[in-house]
Image: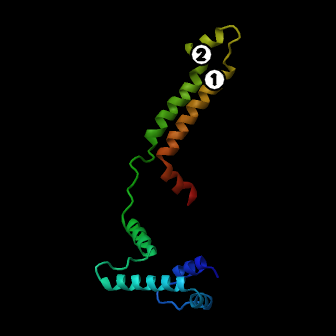
Amino acid sequence: MTCKDAMDLYCYLDQGEPLPADLEAHLASCPTCTQWVQRMDSVLQLYKRSGQHPIPTPIEDRILAAIEALEATPTPKPGLTLSPGKWMLPGVFLLLGILGIPFSTVFSVFASQPGGNLEVLVPVVLGAAFTTYAAFFTGYNLEWLKKKFLT
């Protein structure tokens, strides 16, 4: 066992835990590590006796306490929820807009140009409009949709 291995093993042990046989054998043959372990023990004893600074609680206890505190706090309800009027009216306007595209003067300008047609422009605009509507609907009603379809 090397000195580094011995120091690492000693640091991983719990305080007051008996030393493994290979560590005791190394300490018996290495005065440097023996002095280092004695210094570590004396520092720990001084720290325990000081009384001013209690030994900190393990990190697991602090994490569990933080989780319990988070679970105890009520989660706020989302402000925007699904209401038929809020989403049906824009959906109707979107549908009317889709149906009115062939009669629109904006699109007729593109269709009347040489080589211009609506075969590309109409699907792009329709796709963008529908995707935007669906994204906003899903974003604002995510909790309702999760309850509806995942339970």
Indicate the quadrant containing the C terminus: top left, top right, bottom left or bottom right: bottom right
For the N terminus, give its image quadrant: bottom right
Q: Give the farthest residue toward the right.
A: 115
Quadrant in the rendering for residue 105: top right
Q: In this view, does 138 lie above or below 35?
A: above
Q: What residue type is labelled 2?
A: Phe
Q: Which mark is residue 122?
A: 1
- Label 1 sits on a secondary structure element that is helix
Q: In whole angstroms, how far apart are the C-alphas of marks 1 and 2?
A: 8 Å
Residue type at mark 1: give it.
Val
Most extreme residue toward the front, as rendered? 31
Few, some or many C-alpha atoms within 10 Å of disc 2 (few <14, some 14-19, many ≥20)?
A: some
| Residue 149 position in % (x across, y down) | 57, 55
CB atoms at circles 1 and 2 under 8 Å apart?
yes
Residue at (54% x, 83% y) in the render: 33
Q: Mark 2 points at which residue?
A: 107
Q: Which of 88 and 76 is in front in this view?
A: 76
**Between residues 74 and 1, which one lies in front from this camera angle?**
1
The residue that appears at 51% across and 34% down in the rendered structure is: 91
Q: Where is residue 10 in the image (x, y as percent from the top left)?
A: 53, 82
For the rendered model, the colour scheme is: rainbow
Residue 74: give x, y in percent of width and height: 37, 62
For residue 68, above or below residue 100? below
